[in-house]
Every structure is written in structure tokens, then in C-alpha cells.
Image: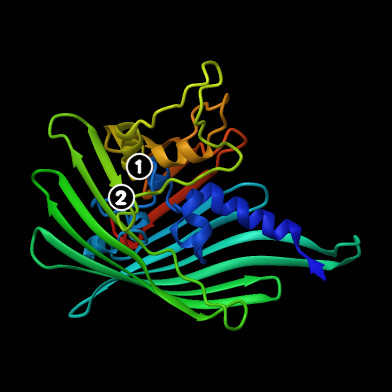
């Protein structure tokens, strides 16, 4: 029987790093990885912000409108080991039809040596997953926005392959004068069309999220709050390697459960906080804090800044550049690079 230890170890690590314990129960987990450097720097995987940034459209289709017409974006994430992922996006508005954003999303797990339990090798193989996204957005009125993504997904892991289809549905309230926005998002509603093995279908990583942001009127700062996994309150799990002590090792007395603290811990696991400071219109500094990521991926005795993320963005001529560094684990932190531009601006005369 042939085994692919490297592949499955890598896939397991991706799930743990990207979505913690929630990530191990679904297929196509790469769909929820933070692709945009701006999103990654602010701690989450989507933002309720409307400022004509096409790099946010993949995660929040309700912000797609005519202001993104002819905008192009490229993003790449230098993940762990030899793994990388990213996207290419382009937006266009058609009269009488609406505004669209097409995005090609991918993750490349790298190359692996195929071997059996006796160490006999059989060559190399690769693994990767891809999604073609067609996003659409529309203004219902000056304050209410709606949008949706249609996703066609393909996954190829050595000789195993799978295809699926999914949609995202988003609705937003936007108050331009108050610099406030909130979005309710339903992600990855869909199913596998073909499974990796016959008769063994797997579920997609469905998720309900709520996000809001507010930019201060007299301060160059915007805060963002994201609530993850509203479809499930309890995101905790029992770790057999680190069981909860039931007896005090010094006194031998039973340890009483702190119900209030336990409830607060469960509630906080849904919370992601981000901030964006822009001292000039062409430069911004970003940071975020993901409580669930810190709780599940930290190492006792060496917690460091696991769960925190940082980044910046700047504009040079007609190009917008963004960078993010997110601390997932004491052993490493992904780097995200994103660039965007308005193609139509190149043909305009000054």
C-alpha cells in the first residue's frame, strides 16, 4: 500500500494553521484563507470596508460597484514550507447589467516524493486547488448593498481529484457621511459535484460572518470588528495532549469550573479586531488581533505574539502596494504581498 505522508502532514498543518480545529471537518478549506494583504494585516478573512479596493471584493462581493471598473489586482502569500497561494482579480461594469469582479484563486502545496512503507520511491507528484470566482454587486439605494460570488472549485491531490460549486451571499449597510459600514456574509453555500473517492462526499466550509467598520471623522483611524462562525457558538475542543486539570496537584482539591470564564472564552473565539491608521492619503499602517488563532495555535511557555498581525499599504503613482505579516505560530508567520491598479487610468491624460 502506497502512502503519501508528506502530503497529508502538509494538508493537516494547513488546516491547523489556517482555520484551527474548525478547519479539519470540511473540504476546500483554502477558500477561507485570507488572500488580501489588507485583510490579513487586520486579522481576519473579510472586511466590511468600502473604499474602491478590489482586493476586498473576493471576500465581500457586496462592495463591487462601478468605482472598481477596470481595476486589476494580484496577490501572493508565502505560506509555510514550500506552500504558496494567491489570486488575480479584475473588475468591470456593464451598463444595464451591473458590476462584476472575476477572480482566479489558487493554492499550491508543492511537490512530493511518492513512497511506500518500505521506502521504495515511485517518483514525484504535486497537489493544488483552484477556484474561479465570478462576483456581482449592486446598490439597492445609497445605503443598502447586496452582492454574491459564484465559485467553481477544482482540487487535485496526487491521483485524487474533486470538483465543487459554491456561492457567497452578502448584504451591507453603508453610511458614507458617517464613515460606517456593516456586512452580513454567508460563505461557501454549496456542495461537491465529484468527491475524491466514490460514495464519500464531503461538506464545504460554510460560515456565517458579521463585520463592521467605522472611520473617525477627526482622526485618521478606522477600526474593524469581525464576528466569525455565527452558525456555531462553541468553537472549543478537547486537546488530548493538554487535558484540563480536574484536581489541584498541590492540595488534591477538585478544581471548580469557572462557568463565566468558559462562556467568555467561547464568545471571544468569534471575535477579530483590526485597526488602520493612515497619516496620509497614500500611506497606512494596519494591525489586527485574532483571539481564536492565539488560543489554538500558541505554545504554552512561548506564546509570543501569536494571533497578532501587522502590515502597511502605500500608493506610488497609479499602483497600490500592500504587505502583511501574520503570526500564526511561534515557528513561522506567512507574508502576503498585494498590488492593485486602475488600468483605465493609464490611458487618461494628465
Percent position (x, y) of residue 291?
Answer: 39, 37
For the residue pair 173 and 134, the one nearer the viewer reads as 173
Badge nearest the viewer, 2 or 1: 1
Q: Which mark is residue 47?
A: 2
Question: Mark 2 or mark 1: which comes first in sequence?
Answer: 2
Q: How many marks?
A: 2
For the residue pair 47 and 86, the one nearer the viewer reads as 47
Q: Residue at x 39, y 51 (%)?
A: 45
Q: Which mark is residue 193?
A: none
- Drawn side of residue 117 relative to residue 329, left or right: right
- Drawn side of residue 310 relative to residue 209, left or right: right
Residue, disc 1: 266
For residue 272, above or below residue 300: below
Q: Residue at x 25, y 50 (%)?
A: 211
Percent position (x, y) of residue 168?
Answer: 33, 68
Percent position (x, y) of residue 72?
Answer: 39, 61
Circle 2 packing at 10 Å, graded few (<14), some (14-19), many (20+), is many
Whether residue 273 appears in this view of the structure is no
Query: Gap between marks 2 and 1, in whole Å?
Result: 22 Å
- Drawn side of residue 175 relative to residue 153, left or right: left
Mark 2 touches mark 1? (CB < 8 Å): no
Q: Residue at x 53, y 69 (%)?
A: 130
Amino acid at each position: 500500500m502506497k502512502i503519501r505522508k508528506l502530503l497529508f502532514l502538509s494538508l493537516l498543518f494547513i488546516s491547523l494553521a489556517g482555520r484551527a480545529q474548525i478547519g479539519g471537518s470540511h473540504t476546500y478549506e483554502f477558500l477561507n484563507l485570507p488572500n488580501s494583504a489588507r485583510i490579513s494585516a487586520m486579522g481576519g478573512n473579510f472586511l466590511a470596508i468600502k473604499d474602491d479596493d478590489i482586493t476586498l471584493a473576493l471576500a465581500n462581493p457586496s462592495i463591487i460597484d462601478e468605482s472598481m471598473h477596470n481595476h486589476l489586482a494580484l496577490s501572493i502569500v508565502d505560506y509555510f514550507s514550500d506552500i504558496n497561494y494567491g489570486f488575480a482579480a479584475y473588475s468591470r461594469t456593464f451598463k444595464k447589467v451591473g458590476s462584476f469582479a472575476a477572480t482566479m484563486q489558487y493554492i499550491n502545496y508543492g511537490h512530493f516524493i511518492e513512497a511506500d512503507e518500505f521506502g521504495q520511491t515511485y517518483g514525484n507528484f504535486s497537489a493544488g486547488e483552484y477556484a474561479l470566482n465570478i462576483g456581482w454587486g449592486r446598490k439597492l439605494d445609497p445605503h443598502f448593498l447586496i452582492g454574491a460570488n459564484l465559485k467553481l472549485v477544482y482540487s487535485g491531490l496526487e491521483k485524487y481529484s474533486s470538483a465543487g460549486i459554491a456561492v457567497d451571499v452578502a448584504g451591507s449597510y453603508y453610511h458614507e457621511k458617517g464613515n460606517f459600514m456593516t456586512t452580513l456574509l454567508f460563505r461557501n453555500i454549496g456542495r461537491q459535484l465529484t468527491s475524491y473517492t466514490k460514495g464519500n462526499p464531503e461538506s464545504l466550509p460554510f460560515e456565517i460572518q458579521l463585520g463592521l467598520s467605522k472611520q473617525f471623522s477627526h482622526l485618521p483611524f478606522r477600526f474593524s470588528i469581525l464576528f466569525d462562525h455565527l452558525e456555531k457558538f462553541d468553537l472549543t475542543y478537547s486537546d488530548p495532549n493538554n487535558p484540563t486539570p480536574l484536581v489541584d496537584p498541590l492540595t488534591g482539591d477538585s478544581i471548580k469550573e469557572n462557568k463565566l470564564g468558559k462562556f467568555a472564552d467561547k464568545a471571544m473565539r468569534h471575535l477579530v479586531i483590526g485597526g488602520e491608521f493612515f497619516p496620509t492619503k497614500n500611506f497606512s499602517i494596519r494591525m489586527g488581533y485574532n483571539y481564536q488563532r492565539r488560543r489554538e495555535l500558541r505554545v504554552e511557555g512561548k506564546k509570543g505574539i501569536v494571533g497578532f498581525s501587522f502590515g502597511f499599504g502605500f500608493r506610488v503613482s497609479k499602483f497600490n502596494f500592500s504587505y502583511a505579516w501574520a503570526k500564526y505560530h511561534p515557528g513561522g508567520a506567512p507574508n502576503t504581498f498585494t498590488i492593485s491598479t486602475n488600468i483605465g487610468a493609464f490611458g487618461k491624460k494628465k
